[in-house]
Image: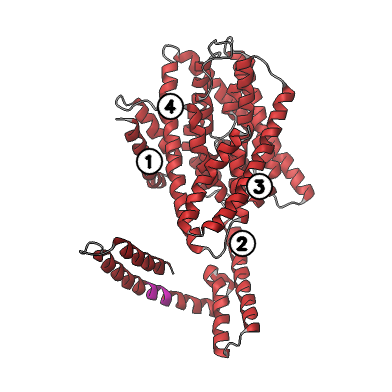
Amino acid sequence: MDQLALLFLLLLGALVSVPVGERLGLPAPVLMTVLGIVLALVDFVPDVDIPPDLILPLLLPPLLYAAVRRTSWRQFAANKRPIFLLAVALVFVTMVCVAATAHAIVPGLPIAAAFALGALVAPPDPVAATAVAGQLGLPRRLVSILEGEGLFNDVTAIVLYHVAIAAAVGGTFSPWRAGLDLVLSAVVAVAVGLALGWGASKLLDLLGDATLQIGLTLLVPYMSYVLAEELHGSGVLAVLTTAMFLAEYAADADDVMTRLAGHTVWDVVDTLVTGVAFGLIGLELHNAVRTASGRWGELLGWAAAIVAVVVLVRLLWLLPATWLTKRLHARRDQDEDIPMSWRETVVMWWSGMRGVASVALALAIPLKTDDGSPFPHRDEIVFIAFGVIMVTLLLQGFTLPWLVGRLGVRADTEREKAFEKELALRAARAAKRRLKEIEAVEELPEELSEQMLRRAFDIGVRISPDIGDEERREAQEQRARRLKRIRRIQGELLSAARHEVLAARSEPGADPEIVDRVLRHLDVRSLR
């Protein structure tokens, strides 16, 4: 088996793991990690030959962009305190605790190399956390915090990692320079993200065609990441900024085709890239196995100690941080998403899985320092890092669904229904306002005006039947049954038409482009 065959096997596994995970009640990323481990242990499967410095640029931009599409700037703004406490403060505290422990238990490990280990295992993986949490029906406030933590903690961790690596390689360290690097990296990233977001929004208007617009959105995350990194900014933060700008300012409410097709394309991209990323995590196990040859007991002991530190620090930090956030929330009476019980805090604690970023940073540790000597204890750092990743990802990933079920942490469906009802009312009122504006400039027959008024109300009733009275609900249900029957029959008619047009594609003299054009018209008609 060669590298290309291995890639296609991972892509196939990414697709199959979704339905299998749903049947087993397990997260697809965790199943892909298991598949990678199995492949790593098979003799005929080759070692993965991807330069470590390409793993983050290839995998993170589309994953981050897809994650931001599912959220909004308002959620991040509302959760700024929990996100700061988790994505910045907790990453820093975890790094320090891991560094102190590693320096104490690993003989001869320099403090700078210990800090590099702490930085690369500190950030929970944004893809793992959101993918797992999103499948478990958790309260939206918890998912929002996990998304915010996962998306922003990589920014902090990667900058701290580069500072620690520079100190280990060069032998010098300046706290003031490290702080300045962190600030400058963020400023450059935000500037690049905003500039590319603005430019991309203008270019989307210029392109017009849905196919070209979606193609541009596939390029934008990579452009943002690479340009920010070239300017010594944070590529992760630049991608987040660009994605948020486009989500807020480049959305056209009437561009239905682009929105539907875009969601489909990005769902496919997200599924495939996520599967490949976690499959690679499992495949990289061979590096750890090679390192541990003849030293299993010693290395496993060190890895177990660091795993304990990572897991316990998160719990010990979350308990007071949640209490403090709730106190500030109560005083300021802000609409902020925070854990509302100890059960939700426990679920947040157990959701701190490590993943893609930690793997890429571990493999990217230089082989030599500036003076030509080997990087101190590089093999031991890589083994410990993989120990943390595997234990947190597999143990927590497999047991999180069970823990959520045992604690009974579930989304507030009543609140979700109430918000859906509110949106349905707003949609119906907007339609009525627009009808009045039309009536002010056009003369509509009374019968047509009444018909349009009923349809304006029905817009909301179809979204949330609860907004109508009993009589209207019954009428709406009858119309819905009638409409369902009409759509079924119409669907069969369109299906017959599509089969006939598609059959013409193989007829002598038929122009495939014209056939495809007619077929596309029929496909679009089927969506209405």
Residue under label 1, please give it: 11
Q: Image height check: is 398 above or below 200?
A: above
| Label 2 to label 4: alpha-carbon separation | 45 Å
Residue under label 3, please give it: 76
Q: Secondary structure at mark 3?
A: helix
Say which quadrant the N terminus sits in: top left
Residue under label 2, please give it: 419
Front in this rendered view, residue 287 or 132: 287
Q: Secondary structure at mark 1?
A: helix
Q: Image height check: is 175 above or below 479?
A: above
Which mark lies nearer to you, 2 or 4?
Answer: 4
181 sits left or right of 236 in the view: right
Where in the figure is residue 497, as x and y percent of width and height?
A: 30, 70
Q: Image height check: is 47 above or below 249?
A: above
Q: Which mark is residue 284?
A: 4
Front in this rendered view, residue 76 or 388: 76
Q: Image height check: is 450 above or below 349?
A: below
Which SS type dominates the magenta stretch?
Answer: helix
Which residues make up the magenta segment? 482-487
Comes first in the chain, label 3 or label 1: 1
